[in-house]
Image (tube, grey):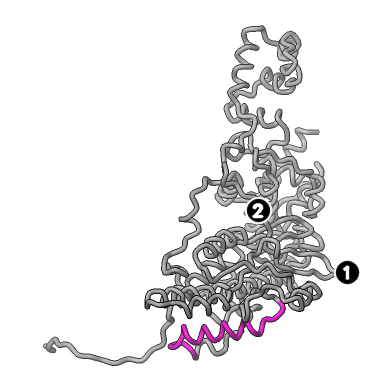
Amino acid sequence: MAGLGQRLEARQGQGLVMTPQLQQAIKLLQLNNMELTEFVEEELERNPLLERDERPEAGDREAQTAAERDGADEPAGSDELSFDAPGKADEALDADSEAMYSDSKADMAGAENTGGSVDWSRAGTGGGGFDGEDYDAAANATREKTLHEHLHDQLAELSFDPSDRMIAAHLIDLTEDDGYLRADLDETAQRLGVTRSEIEAIVDRLQQFEPAGVMARSLQDCLALQLKERDRLDPAMAALVDNLPLLAKHDYAGLKAACGVDAEDLTDMIAELKRLTPKPGLGFGGDGARSVEPDVTVRERPDGGWAVELNTDTLPRVLMNNRYAAQISGAARTEEEKVFITQCAQNASWLVKSLDQRARTILKVSSEIVRQQDAFFAKGVAWLRPLNLKTVADAVDLHESTVSRVTSNKYVATPRGLFELKYFFTSSIASSDGGEAYSAEAVRYRIKAMIDAETAGDVMSDDKIVDRLHADGVEIARRTVAKYREAMNIPSSVQRRRIMKGAG
């Protein structure tokens, strides 16, 4: 039997050095512009070497040149958030990366500067902030959940068709704080490239969300939804809801005649009506309610292409005042003061560089998504292409988890509306002729369009739908058609035939 003993071994290996600054940079990438602004405000209060960059945008060359010529109060040698000079910022990031990854230089050598000389994806989600403390946006938020967040949470739990989910998410974002959906549905349908009936079908499903009465189109609609949820929308109550103007005028005789009830029943009905909530959305959000602001904007260029730009209106711009840093550094007397100033300078420099890198990464990923989904922007939801994180990650030379961070909780304003970037990722279905694959959402849209166009004498079975899709070059199985049809709450061909005959 071999004896047990202890021995020392020396092994060489490569490892990732996770600094607090790197962990913080990863968290910055996950924040949207509004959350990022809040974080930067905290850093401005905490760090005396940081200040807002209130100079003209880089695009305003004439104004900027005039400011320099007139000797504007600008910190000498300051670092700034600039989208026009990537070289300097990227070189700085490379230098910092070399320092942080002293054991991983070989792995980092081939990384592309734009989009991450620092490999964001391999970092953990552990703590570490600019001041040595954890920064957790969720933990630091003391506000109540907003109505929109509450509705989006419910949407995530339901089996919506992905293309319908995109429409539903857009409708939720259009819902006002009091819970009403007052948007023009015809205009919304036109923007999304769908029919009004499709929009209305999704609204009907969303109106089943909590709180009862949410996403109503009118006060009558709101009250009716609440009564329906309580199983109290009988003909008499429906008549009362339809005649609210008479109630406002205290025309009780007219209400008794319209509802077909006596005075006692009418009194009870009015009392029940008063117990309902005319503005169901006001119970959410409170002072913490926030409007959704786009992080990226997409607009059509004159040549027919798409211009992708960061929303600089909500993007915080900061710089480090090197002149002031030099002044207070020279005045420092104790070792504690020197350490504090050094830490502030390092944290300020890293924040400026991290903001610049974050902006570049978001713009790079967003531009690739728009390039991949250009048909959607030109023609509508039915033209969504199959797209996954890996496709975008490979195209922009980033890790999938980095793309996931960039697209979560980031919104893009487009000619078709405001969408979260992650909604553009869709599954795919192969093409039977070996050509480009089809988006699953686009195929579902085709199936629904075929069924909507049916007549009583021509109701298609799932097999017939498969044949038509095969004729169009879509390789799909019958069970997949059945699954998509059921997910859209569409009855079978037998049931549809009976419904049409009954309607006739």
Residue count near mark 2 (Cα–Cα under 10 Å), binned few <14, some 14–19, many ≥20 = some
Count of picture labels: 2
In the picture, measured across the screen, residue 393 lies left or right of residue 62, that is left
**Frontmost residue, 166 versus 143:** 143
Q: Secondary structure at mark 2?
A: loop
Q: Residue at x 74, y 71 (%)?
A: 371
The answer, for residue 432, to whether it is visible in the render is: no
Q: Label for residue 77? A: none
- The residue wearing badge 2 is 292
Indicate which disc, 1 or 2, sits on the residue closer to the N terminus: 2
Q: Is residue 7 above or below residue 326?
A: below
The answer, for residue 294, to whether it is visible in the render is: yes
Location of the N terminus by quadrant is: bottom left
Image location of residue 21, percent across then percent down: 48, 74
Q: Residue at x 57, y 44 (%)?
A: 287
Q: Is residue 284 above or below residue 311?
A: above
Q: CA distance from mark 1 to mark 2?
A: 28 Å
**Frontmost residue, 276 versus 261:** 276
Q: Mark 2 is on which residue type?
A: Val
Image location of residue 281, percent across then percent down: 61, 38
Q: Mark 1 is on which residue type?
A: Pro
**Frontmost residue, 100 versus 449:** 100
* Residue 467 in magenta stretch: no
Q: Residue at x 75, y 61 (%)?
A: 469
Which quadrant of the figure has residue 91? bottom right
Q: Secondary structure at mark 1?
A: loop
- The residue wearing badge 1 is 302
Q: Which residues are magenta?
A: 84-105
In the picture, measured across the screen, residue 220 lies left or right of residue 349, that is right
- Is the magenta region chiefly helix, strand or loop? helix
